[in-house]
Image (spheres, helix red, strand yellow):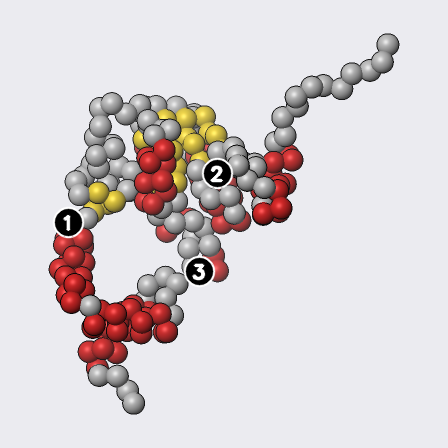
Amino acid sequence: MAYPAPLERLIKVFECFPGIGRRSAERLAFHLLRDPEAATLASVIEDALARTRRCSECYNVAEADPCGICSDPARKRDGVFVVEEPRDVEAVERTGAWGGLYHVLMGALNPAEGTESAHLTIAGLVKRVQRGEIREVILGTDPDSEGEATALAVLQALDAAGARVGVSRLARGVPAGSALEYLHRGVIEDALAARVALRKETTNP
């Protein structure tokens, strides 16, 4: 038996979300129908769409433009941390380890899914660097094939624009507190390539 048309439309909307298939969409739809608190979802979504915007400077999500980070006078202005998504900004901010600015690329290169350089905010980053205030660009893209390709695209765009700015990449290797048996092959390869000498080889007299 087919679902009522309004319910079917709701299921189809959930299916549009990343990682949500038909079965998961059905479970979400039926959860909404039986949970009285779910009635607030529509107003919450409407409020989020109406009050959330992109910062015209760093492209992070915010209620105001420029965002709170870009407009904070206490932030160091000579370094920009480049990340793929707004959630990456949130993750770094929770650590309190970075006191500078950010730039959100809004994704990573993935030709298989149709994401190319033109879909990212690389051009916006180049314009920011060309203003001359930024001295270092820190590439914080994910340590996977898409992240590596994205970092390379950013570097090439800066070079093509003649940007005279330092570019660095986040260090990679074995995370503290982890066990080798659970690590991805790429993590171990990176750790070996960037290994630190504790003592140089000595020769007998």
- Callout count: 3
* Marks 3 and 1, the one that precedes in the sequence: 1
Q: Residue furthest right?
A: 205
Task: Please give the residue where the numbered disc 3 appears in the rendered image.
Answer: 113
Q: Secondary structure at mark 1?
A: helix
Counting from the top left corner in percent of width and height, residue 184 is at 58, 47
Position of residue 109 measured from the top left corner of the image (x, y, whole percent): 45, 50
Instruction: Label 2, secondary structure: give it.
Output: helix
Q: 171 or 101: nearer the eye? A: 171
Q: Amino acid at mark 1?
A: Arg
Q: CA distance from mark 2 to mark 3?
A: 22 Å
Q: In this view of the protein, which residue sits in the foreground, 59 or 122?
A: 59
Kind of residue indicated by mark 2? Gln
Is mark 3 in CB contact (under 8 Å) with mark 1?
no
Give the residue number, with chain letter if any, for mark 2. 156
Task: Name which residue type carries label 3.
Answer: Glu
Q: Which mark is residue 51?
A: 1
Query: On the rendered structure, is 172 left or right of 105?
Result: right
Q: Looking at the image, is 67 positioned above or below residue 78?
A: below
Q: Nearer the viewer, mark 3 or mark 1?
A: 1
Q: CA distance from mark 1 to mark 2?
A: 35 Å
Is there CB contact under 8 Å for labels 1 and 2? Answer: no
The image quadrant of residue 22 is bottom left
Is disc 3 placed on a helix, strand or loop? helix
